[in-house]
Image (cartoon, rainbow, N blue to C red):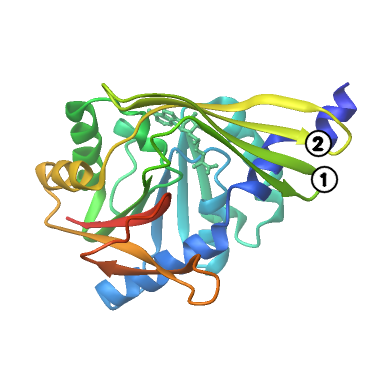
C-alpha cells in the first residue's frame, strides 16, 4: 500500500491539476513592475501548502527570497523534501510553520494569498484582522495579491471532472448555505488504475463577494485596490489568461480574478 501511495502522491496530483505557478508568478512579476516601476525581491506566500509558488519565485532570480507560511507540518515537510531539491536557488526559500496572522515575517515587497485559502476566515472582523496584519508586513511600496472566485455556479452544489495525466481530478462543491454563504468543497482524485482518493483535500469556506473583499481591504487600511479581470478568447469564448485592471466584469457562470491591494 505504501508503494501505491508514493506512486500516487496527492500533493503531486494537486500540483498537476490545480496549480500553474509559472503563470501566477508571471502575472505577479509583471504587475508589480507596472505599478512600482522596479523589481520586487522579498515575497511571502501565505497558506503556502507545499510552497510551490514561493519556489517558483526564488528560481526566477538569484536575488529573490521567499517565505512559505503554513500551519500544517505535513505540507511544509513535503515541500522541503520534494520542492527544495529541484530549486536552483535553494537557500532563497524559507519555510515557516505559523498562523498567517502572526508569522512575524515583515518588510515584504509582496504578500500572496492564493487559491482562495483566505476564504476560510468566516467573519468580517477576522478577515479584516488578517488584512491589517498583511498591511503591517508590507514595505510602503509593497503589494498584496489575492485571488478570488465567483459567478452564479460558485453558489451551486455541483461536481466537475477533468482528465489529467494518470488520474481524474474532481472538484466537488458538496454544499452551499445561502443564509451565511458557507460552503463545503472537496477535491477527489481517482487514478487510472482505480484508486479513489476521496476527499483528498477539504475546504470549508465562506464565498465572499468582490465588493465585500474590497470593502474589508479598505477598512484594513489599503489605499488602492484593483480587480484584475480575465479577458476572453474570441475564438473559444473562454478566458484568455490575460488579467487586466477593470471596473466592469462579465456575468460569467464561473470566474476567477486577482485583487491587487496597495498599502
Ligand atoms: C487551499 S490550501 C493552500 C494550498 C496552497 N496555496 C497551494 O496552492 O498549494 C490551504 C492551506 O492553508 C493552511 N492554513 C489554514 N489556516 C491557516 C492559518 N491560519 N495560517 C497558516 N496556514 C493556514 C492549511 O494548512 C493549508 O495547507
Q: Badge 2, how many Cα within 10 Å: few under 14, some, many 20+?
A: some
Secondary structure beneath label 1: loop
Q: Which mark is residue 124?
A: none
The percent position of residue 251, horizontal first and vertical second, equals 32, 55
Q: Quadrant of residue 168?
A: top right
Above or below, comparing residue 213 to residue 59 in the picture: above
Q: Are marks 2 and 1 in contact (CB under 8 Å)?
A: yes
Q: Quadrant of the N terminus?
A: top right
Q: Which residue is mark 2?
A: 191
Q: Nearer the viewer, residue 210 or 221?
A: 210
Q: Looking at the image, which residue is at 17% across and 55% down?
A: 263
Q: Is residue 25 left or right of residue 122?
A: right
Q: Which residue is mark 1?
A: 166
Above or below, comparing residue 210 to residue 170 in the picture: below
Q: Looking at the image, which residue is at 56% across and 63% down?
A: 22
Q: Nearer the viewer, residue 132 or 90?
A: 132
Q: Quadrant of residue 40?
A: bottom left
Q: Looking at the image, which residue is at 22% across and 43% down?
A: 213
User: In this view of the protein, can residue 155 be seen by the observer?
Assistant: yes
The percent position of residue 153, horizontal first and vertical second, equals 42, 41
The percent position of residue 104, horizontal first and vertical second, equals 32, 37
Secondary structure beneath label 2: strand
Amino acid at each position: 500500500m505504501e508503494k501505491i501511495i508514493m506512486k500516487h502522491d496527492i500533493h503531486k496530483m494537486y500540483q498537476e491539476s490545480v496549480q500553474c505557478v509559472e503563470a501566477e508568478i508571471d502575472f505577479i512579476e509583471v504587475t508589480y513592475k507596472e505599478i512600482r516601476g522596479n523589481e520586487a525581491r522579498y515575497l511571502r506566500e501565505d497558506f503556502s501548502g507545499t510552497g510551490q509558488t514561493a519556489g517558483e519565485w526564488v528560481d526566477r532570480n538569484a536575488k529573490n527570497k521567499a517565505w512559505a507560511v503554513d500551519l500544517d507540518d505535513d505540507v511544509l515537510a513535503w515541500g522541503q523534501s520534494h520542492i527544495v531539491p529541484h530549486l536552483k536557488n535553494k537557500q532563497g526559500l524559507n519555510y515557516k510553520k505559523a498562523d498567517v496572522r502572526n508569522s512575524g515575517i515583515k518588510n515584504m515587497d509582496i504578500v500572496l494569498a492564493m487559491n482562495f485559502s483566505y476564504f476560510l476566515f468566516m467573519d468580517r472582523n477576522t478577515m479584516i484582522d488578517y488584512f491589517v496584519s498583511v498591511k503591517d508586513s508590507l514595505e510602503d511600496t509593497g503589494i498584496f495579491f489575492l485571488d478570488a472566485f465567483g459567478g452564479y455556479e460558485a453558489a451551486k452544489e455541483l461536481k466537475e471532472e477533468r482528465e489529467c495525466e494518470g488520474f481524474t481530478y474532481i472538484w466537488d462543491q458538496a454544499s452551499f448555505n445561502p443564509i451565511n454563504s458557507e460552503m463545503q468543497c472537496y477535491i477527489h482524485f481517482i487514478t487510472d488504475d482505480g484508486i479513489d482518493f476521496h476527499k483528498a483535500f477539504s475546504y470549508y469556506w465562506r464565498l465572499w463577494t468582490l465588493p465585500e473583499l474590497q470593502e474589508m481591504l479598505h477598512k484594513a487600511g489599503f489605499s488602492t485596490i484593483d480587480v484584475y479581470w480575465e479577458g476572453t478568447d474570441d475564438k473559444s469564448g473562454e478566458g484568455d489568461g490575460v488579467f487586466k485592471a477593470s471596473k466592469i466584469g462579465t456575468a460569467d457562470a464561473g470566474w476567477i480574478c486577482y485583487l491587487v491591494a496597495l498599502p
